[in-house]
Image (cartoon, grey):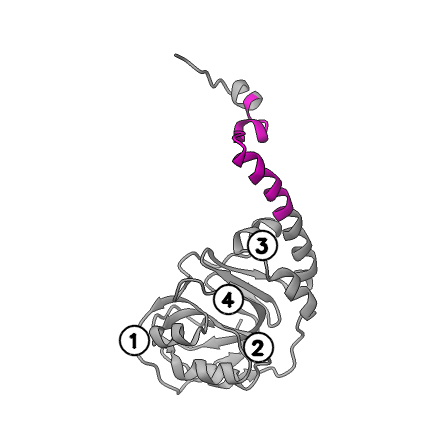
Amino acid sequence: MYELGVVKQNIQRPDPADVAALAPYPVATVHEAMGRVGLMRPYMRPIYRGARICAPAVTVLLQPGDNWMLHVAAEQVQSGDVVVAGCVTESEDGFFGELLATSLRSRGAVGLVIDGGCRDTLELEEMDFPVFSRTINSKGTVKATLGSVNIPVVCANALINPGDVIVADHDGVVVVPREKVATVAAAAKAREDNEEAKRARFAAGELGLDIYDMRGKLADLGLKYVD
């Protein structure tokens, strides 16, 4: 059950060195390194090409058509944070634009992930302020109803606790629990090193059939080659 009308001012964030160790790896690698968990729904898209985020989350619970709590959240942002906003029910209104981005950036925020609408996208691209959103929508919002800041929220079917790390790129958005950041960074590095070795073999002309030792299993299942 959501708490309404709550702003939690002191949250635990992961070690910045662990966040930095995770930052080089793409969403797909991080997702695989965690055991194929943590992805937000694939409708969450960057508003411009090349947008990327790896940062601990300040969480926001919004009411539909109301962006008041994003302004409240700005006060809780520390340098290097990403704001992550879910809503009590589905809403595609344009909660966020260039003015709020200017406010968040002045506090040190490095981006926004929102299960709702975003507008002023050309200005946000010119600012190079990364936003990953459910949709782009010019419809405005009001400031009238309480939500909460820094409570557990669900954003695009993913649970985010304050201080969890968000990794976002052109392939999507994944959530890394705060206490697992170092472990996932190490697993992502091991996966990337393994893929680099395979990449060289593929480039040399080897087939996945042989690299992954697939031929025996295919034969056992009855695959036949015919002229």
- Answer few, some or many: residues within 10 Å of disc 2's Cα (few below 14, many 20 plus, some between 14 and 19): many
From the image, tell me which residue sits under label 3. Answer: 30
Q: Nearer the viewer, residue 202 or 65?
A: 202
> Above or below — where is 113 with respect to 40?
below
Q: What segment carries the magenta color?
A: 191-215
> Does 182 sit left or right of 224 as displayed?
right
x 58%, y 30%: residue: 211
Spatial CA distance of label 3 from label 4 is 20 Å
Residue on which disc 2 sits: 150
Q: Are marks 4 and 1 in contact (CB under 8 Å)?
A: no
In the rendered structure, which amino acid carries the disc numbered 3? Answer: Val
Residue at image position (57%, 77%) is: 150
User: Under tag 3, what secondary structure?
Assistant: helix
Q: Is residue 137 left or right of residue 216?
A: left
The image position of residue 110, as x and y in percent, is 52, 74
The residue beneath circle 1 is 138
Q: Which mark is on residue 154?
A: 4
Please rate how many residues cluster around mark 3, counting C-alpha atoms within 10 Å: few if below 14, some from 14 to 19, many from 20.
many
Q: Secondary structure at mark 1?
A: loop
Residue at 39% of width from left, 72% of height from top? 125
Q: Are marks 3 and 4 in contact (CB under 8 Å)?
A: no
Which amino acid type is marked by label 1? Ser
Q: Is residue 174 magenta?
A: no
Q: Between label 4 and label 1, give the one nearer the viewer.
A: 1
Q: CA distance from mark 1 to mark 3?
A: 33 Å
